Image (cartoon, helix red, strand yellow):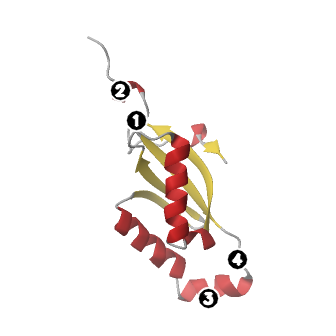
Amino acid sequence: MSQTDSATKPMHIHTIWGRRPMSKLKRLVALFVPMAEIQLLEFISKHKLCHTGFWDDGFRLTIPLDNKTPQKALADLAALMEIGELHKYYEFVAYVLTDNPDEFDPDVAITA
């Protein structure tokens, strides 16, 4: 019996995003009016993305490759984030390819 391509090829990509540097005034306003977080949650809901991690200065999104190259999947996600105006708040940091969307090994991350 031969193995299928799905068993040998990564099927998902974990993307890691960091918060862009902000001025002190913008950081202070963000404490009371979390516009970036609200936009991010709306974006995740709208595009049915899997967000599996949030921390103070970033987050992780997991997206299916859907027969795309990792570079094409990243470019598509970056374009969607730009349309959603999230590029003003977050920047791409790294990605990890995986077969299982629930598994994440930060030691094998590929940085930008």
- Which residue is most to the left? 1
Horizontal side of 14 relative to 109 (left or right) equals left
Considering only order in the chain, which callout, 1 or 4, is on the residue closer to the N terminus? 4
Identify the secondary structure beneath mark 2. Answer: helix
Q: Position of residue 25 (x, y in %)?
A: 70, 88
The crowding category of the residue bearing disc 2, from other C-alpha atoms within 10 Å (few below 14, some 14 to 19, many at least 20), is few
Identify the residue position indicated by label 2 in the image: 7
- Which is closer to the viewer, label 3 or label 2? 2
CA gap between label 3 and label 1 equals 40 Å
The crowding category of the residue bearing disc 1, from other C-alpha atoms within 10 Å (few below 14, some 14 to 19, many at least 20), is some
Identify the residue position indicated by label 1 in the image: 99
Q: Are marks 3 and 2 in contact (CB under 8 Å)?
A: no
Q: Position of residue 58 (x, y in %)?
A: 57, 63
Mark drawn on residue 22: 4
Using the image, determine if residue 23 lies above or below residue 76.
below
Using the image, determine if residue 13 lies above or below residue 4.
below
Using the image, determine if residue 76 lies above or below residue 22.
above
Q: Are marks 1 and 2 in contact (CB under 8 Å)?
A: yes
Residue found at x 71% / y 71%? 21
The crowding category of the residue bearing disc 4, from other C-alpha atoms within 10 Å (few below 14, some 14 to 19, many at least 20), is few
Considering only order in the chain, which callout, 1 or 3, is on the residue closer to the N terminus? 3
Residue found at x 70% / y 77%? 22
Mark drawn on residue 29: 3
Residue found at x 40% / y 35%? 99
Q: Quadrant of residue 3?
A: top left
Q: How many marks?
A: 4
Indicate the amino acid at tag 1: Asp
Indicate the amino acid at tag 4: Met
Identify the secondary structure beneath mark 4. Answer: loop
